[in-house]
Image: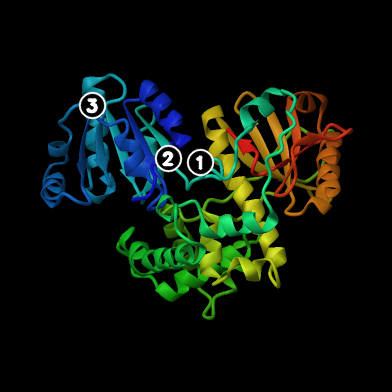
Amino acid sequence: MPELRSRIVEAVIADRLKTHGAVLVTGPKAVGKTTTARLFAASEVRLDQDRAALTGARIDPRLVLDGDTPRLIDEYQLAEGVWDAVRGRIDDVGGKGLFLLAGSATPEPDQALHTGAHRIAPVLMRTMTFFERGISGGRLSLGKLLEGDPAPSIADRTSVSSAIEALSIGGWPTNLGLSLEEALDANGDYLELMTQVDVRRVDGVRRSPDAVRRLIASYGRNVATDAGIRTIGRALEEPLSEPTLHDYLDALRRLFLIEDQESWKPRLRSRIRLVATPKRHLADPSLAVAALGASPDRLLGSEIELAGFLFESQVVHDLRVYADPHRARVRFYRDNKGLEVDGIVERRDGRWIGVEVKLGIHRVDEGAANLLALMKKLDDQTREQCGALVVVVADSPTYTRPDGVIVSSIAALGP
C-alpha cells in the first residue's frame, strides 16, 4: 500500500466546510480525492463502487443524501440530479459542512457551479508537490514571501538530474515508492486509460483515442509556452476541424487533465500591450513525459530545452498548490516588448510575488534581470504590493542577492 501523506488541500477543504453547505472536491483521476475527502466525512456513499446506491440515485437522487454529516458522495456526477438534490437539501436544512462531493469529471461545469453559488464551494485537488512527496523541505514559505518577510538562508537543494527524474515519476500518490521505470510504465498506462475510456465516458461522445493521445502529446511538447490552439492541433496526423479540436480540449479540461495558466494584467506606468494567450500546462508534468515517450536520460540529453519547460511547469504546479491556502492564484506576465516573467503569485488583496524559473544556475542573472525589468514597468502602488522577487532553480541554496532578488531551489519551496 502507498504511504498516506498529508496534503496541503486538506486545510482548504476544512476552511470551505465552515463557510459552505457542501464542498466539491474535483481533480484528475488518482490524485487522492476520495482518500482526502474521507478524512472529513462522517458517512459516505461511493457511486462508482455501490451499484445499488447508483441505481437508486438515478431513480431518485434524494435516496443517497441521508447520513451523518459531512456526508461524502463519491463520483457524484455518475447520477444525474445529485447536484441539484444536494443544493436543494442545503437550502431546506441550512447549516454548513453538510456534504462532500468528489468527482473526476465535471458534467456541464459552468451551469453546475453557477447553480451552486454560495452553497457549494469548488476545491481543485492536484497531484502531489515536491513538498508533499518529501523532496522539498518547504522552509521557504510562499505565505511568508507574500507578506514580504526576508528569506532565510537555506541549504536545501536538489540536482538537475534528480529534479527531472522526480517530475518524470510524477506526483501521483500511487507512484510513491515505485522505481523510475515502474512509474514511467504506470503513467503510460494511466494515459492509455484516459484516451481509451475516460475521454468517451465523460459525456458519451465517441472520440478517436489516437487523436486524443496525439493531442496530449502536442500539449506536452508545448508545455509552459503560450502556443496557440491551432499550433497544438497541427501535431495531429489528420488535423481536426477547429470546432472538433475545441471539443476534444474541452473533454480534457472536464477530466482535469489540462490546466492552463492565465496572464497577469497589472497596472503599468505606460501603455504596453499585454499577451492574453494562456500558457499550456498538463495536470502533472509526468503526463507530458509519458505522452512523448520520453525519459530523464533523453530529457537531459537531446531534449534539454524541453526539460527546462517541464521544470517550469513543475514549479508552476507546486506554486498553485502552495498558493491555494493563501487565496492566491498563479499567473504569468508577458508583454509585446518581449519581457516575460514565468509566475506571478497574487493574493486576492493584491499582494504578489514574481517568480522566474531556470533549470540551471547559470541562468540566474537572466531571471533576476527579467524580474527587475518588470518592477520598472509597474506603477507605484503595484510595486509596493510586491512581497518578493524569486528565481527558482534546482541546484542552489537559498540566498538573497545584493539587488534584492531571492534565489532558491524547488527543494526549499513550501506553503
Alpha carbon distance from label 2 to label 3: 24 Å
Which residue is tagged 1? Answer: 132
For marks 1 and 3, give the CA distance: 28 Å
Vertical arrangement, residue 294 with respect to residue 150, above or below: below
What residue is shown at x 55% (from left), y 63% (from top)?
288
Closer to the camera in the image, 408 or 390: 408
Counting residues from the start of the chain, the first of labels 2 and 3 encountered is 2
Q: Percent x, y for residue 392?
A: 72, 44
Q: Looking at the image, is mark 1 or mark 3 nearer the viewer?
A: 1
Q: Residues within 10 Å of mark 3 (few under 14, many from 20)?
A: some
The mark found on residue 5 in the picture is 2
Q: Which of the two labelled residues, at mark 1 and mark 2, occupies the earlier sequence position?
A: 2
| Cβ atoms at labels 1 and 2 below 8 Å apart | yes
Instruction: Find residue 237 and report its horizontal and vertical position in percent.
Output: 54, 80
Compare residues 97 and 302 and report the one nearer the observer: 302
Q: Which mark is residue 92?
A: none
Query: Which residue is identified by label 3?
Result: 69
In the image: residue 314, left or right of residue 371: left
Say few, some or many: other residues with alpha carbon within 10 Å of mark 1 (under 14 / 14 to 19 / 20 or more): some
